[in-house]
Amino acid sequence: MVTELDKPKPKIVVTPPGPKARELLAKYADTLSRSVVGIYPLVVESGSGCFVRDVDGNEFIDFNSGLVVLNVGHSHPRVVKAIKDQAEKLIHYSWTDFSYQRIIEHGEQLKAITPGTFPKRVFFANSGAEANEAAMKMSRWHTRKSLFLAYTSAFHGRTFGTMSLTASKPVQRRHFFPLVPETTHVPYPYCYRCPFHLTYPECNLWCVDFIEEEVLKKFHPPEDTAAMFVEAIQGEGGYVVPPDDYFPRLKKILDKYDILLVADEVQSGIGRSGKWFGIEHWEGVIPDIITSAKALGAGLPLGAAIAREELMDWEPGSHANTMGGNPVACAAGLQVINIIKEERLLENATRQGAYLMKRLKEMQQKYQIIGEVRGKGLMIGVELVKDRKTKEPAAEEATEVTNKCFRRGLALITAGKSTMRFAPPLIVTHEIIDAALEVFEGAIKEVNAQLN
């Protein structure tokens, strides 16, 4: 296990992947589904705080938080204790047919931290995809409408329902058609790469008006549209942050046509952006449904859809599951919320995120390969380009930077075509950020030099 004495520097004792990792990776390739592809050959043995150790003893700074799951860090002592204590009492008893205390307590906490003062209800699931499936079914049931709106480059899951909303990569849909009809995708407000080739704010937010003028008024009837699914900050699409006035204007259009707003906060929620949920950065925009997962369970499978009470008017038996809201996962989830509150991690995410953003923007001035730095809190994207004028994505270079960082002890991953995503645990410190950026800048400097 990684110890406090080892921090805040990475420690590479053998160039990864080492011999034990290579042996296990060979078995991995022979045993598990080919549909799962590793980003780089990291075989994790243990983790603590902001660090993970591989099976060969290498210690890495974890700046992806186990795919944006471990917001309170690896193996937080209070989470571990909650899991142990709950497992000794009750591991499972399906919430869809019976009840237990932990799921009620966690549901009450989620109702309290989600935006909106109106009455709410919670549906528990095991993942973000399941939470989004619940939101789809709930929307159709309540509205008796069948159509959905979503965004290009969106990621909402890989089940048949959520895959119909997802529009991130062709491989996620190829050979799986027909999907759930009918979902229309519209361009996300990606100002750095505006799909309409306009410039903000001179564009007057045409990307919002486009939804009404070119979609709802021409071929996607609003009276048949149940809901629009949005990511407050687009995750897999490249950590893209909409302009300040985007969501307020969008909400007015949705309200005008009585279309529900579903905020997918699977990646941007539970404090990641410096607020409980990313949509809170847009004042006055209150979703009808919020979906959550990833950091919700501190690494245990847990998802939830939190909605206006009147939306959960579906009849008993119309939607359920066996494992959702598992008592052990809920015990861990309760501690996640308590830790974020008591350790003031929303404030830390804001403070450390500002510091990290400042450091990255300083690098942007030095290295032409960095086209844009964007984000909220500790959800920051650094987009790499081959040329700042043409903005040609530096996809191969992003992969090279990722691998160089890995070999030197920094676990980073990419998003979109060529964006490095920075998502360390919310407990991160200036010292750990400095150590991580030392590795990152070394990799960027080398790859940037190859472009010149």
Image: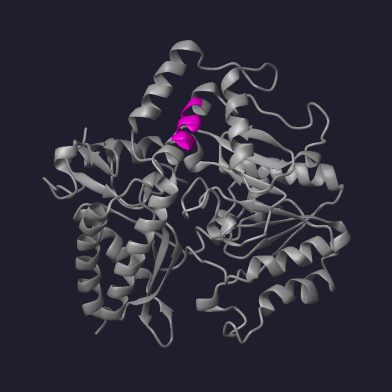
Q: Is residue 305 above or below residue 317?
A: below
Quarter the N terminus occupies: top left
**Residue 177 in view, yes or no:** no
The answer to whether 106 appears left or right of 393 in the picture is: right
* Residue 337 highlighted magenta (yes or no): yes
The residues colored magenta run 331-338
Quarter the C terminus occupies: bottom left
Q: Residue 312: x, y in percent?
A: 78, 37
Q: Is residue 38 above or below residue 92?
A: below
Question: 276 or 58, which is in the foreground?
Answer: 276
Q: Residue 399: x, y in percent?
A: 33, 64
The extreme top residue here reads 89
Q: Is residue 203 above or below residue 116?
A: below
Colour basis: one colour
Q: Residue at x 60, y 71 (%)?
A: 189
Q: Residue 292: x, y in percent?
A: 57, 43
- Count of number-bearing discs: 0
Q: Is residue 32 above or below residue 103?
A: below
Q: Residue at x 17, y 50 (%)?
A: 9
Residue 31, located in which quarter of the rendered image?
Answer: top left
* Residue 149 highlighted magenta (yes or no): no
Residue 314, located in which quarter of the rendered image?
Answer: top right
The answer to whether 400 appears left or right of 389 in the picture is: left
Tell me the chief SS of the magenta region. helix
Q: Residue at x 28, y 65 (%)?
A: 400
Question: 406 or 274, which is in the foreground?
Answer: 274
Residue 284, located in which quarter of the rendered image?
Answer: bottom right
Q: Residue 25: x, y in percent?
A: 29, 41
**Residue 305 in view, yes or no:** yes
